[in-house]
Amino acid sequence: MALLNSLASTLESYRGRDRLIRTLGYCCQLIGGVLVEQFPTRSEVGMRLLAVSAQLSHCRTVLRLFDDLAMFSYTKQYGLGAEEEDVLIRWLSVLGNMADQLYYPCEHVAWAADAKVLHVDSARWWTVSTALWGLSLLLGIVKSLWMMLKLREKLGSPTATFTSRLTRSKRRALELQLRSEVLTLLSNLADLANAVHWLPRGVLWAGRFPSWLVGLMGTISSLLSIYQAARTGSQAEANSP
C-alpha cells in the first residue's frame, strides 16, 4: 500500500511523471530492440514495444512545450552565478543554462515542422536541438568531474579528520555529495552517448547505435535519475523536524 501511495504521489508531479514516462519508454525500446534483433519469431512484439516507445517519446516532446517559462525562471534566478564560489563551476553553469534555454524553442520548431504547423526543415532543427542538448550534457560532465576533484581534495585534506561529531557530519555530507556527482556523471555520459547517436551521420558514432543500445543507455540514465530523486526525497524527510 505504501508503494502504491508513493507511486501515486510521484505521478501527481510533472517531474515524477516525466521520469516514469522516460524510463518506461527507454525500457520498451531496450526490450523491443532485443526482440527484433535477436528473436525473429518475436519481432512483432518487439515492433509493438518500439511503437510504444516512440509514442512515449512524442508525449514527452509535447509536454516540453510548456517548459520554457520554468527554464527561464531558473536561468534568471541563477543569473551569472554571483553567489557561486568556484569560478569554473559558475561559468559552466551559466553556459549550461544558456544551452538548455535555447534547446526548448529549437525543439518546439522541430516538433511544429513535423506536425506541419511550420513549413521549415524539421531535420535541421532536430539537429540543432540535439546539439544543444549534447553541449549541455558535456558541460555537465565537465562540471561533475571538477566537483569530484574538489570534493576528493577536501576529503583527503588534513582538516578532514574525525576529531568531532561536527567534522564527521561534514565528512558524511561531502561523501554523499561526491556519490551524487558520480551518479550524475554516469547519467550524463549515458545521455551523451545517445545525443551523439542522434546527430547527423559522420559525427563520431552518429547513427550507429542499434535500438536496443539506445534503450539501454536511456534506461541507465533514467534509473539513475529516479534513484537520485528518491534519495534526495528520503534525505529531505530525514532532515525535516
Image (cartoon, helix red, strand yellow):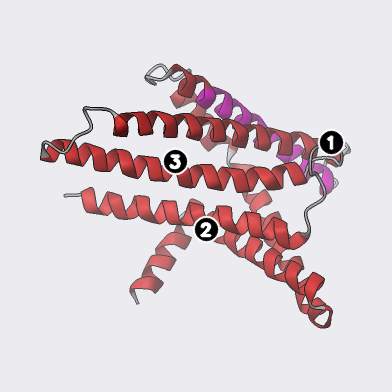
| Residue 150, picture quadrant | top left
Read off the residue under disc 3: 181
Q: Residue at x 70, y 43 (%)?
A: 195
Instruction: Using the image, determine if residue 94 lies above or below residue 201.
Output: above
Q: Mark 2 against mark 1, which lies toward the viewer?
A: 2
Read off the residue under disc 2: 223
Q: In this rendering, would 42 be left or right of 64?
A: right
Q: Is residue 79 visible?
A: no
Instruction: Using the image, determine if residue 142 lies above or below residue 47.
Output: above
Q: Residues within 10 Å of mark 2 (few under 14, many from 20)?
A: some
Gap in angstroms between the C-alphas marked 2 and 3: 15 Å
| Residue segment shown in magenta | 92-115
Q: Is residue 11 visible?
A: yes
Where is residue 188 shown, x and y percent of the image?
57, 43
From the viewer's side, name the closer residue of 196 and 10: 196
Residue extending farthest to the bottom is 41
Magenta stretch secondary structure, dominant? helix
Q: Is residue 86 magenta?
A: no
From the viewer's side, name the closer residue of 69 and 186: 186
Dot 2: element: helix
Where is residue 101 shown, x and y percent of the image?
61, 30
Marks 2,1: beta carbons within 8 A? no
Gap in angstroms between the C-alphas marked 2 and 1: 30 Å
Q: Residue at x 50, y 33 (%)?
A: 145
| Residue 156, picture quadrant | top left
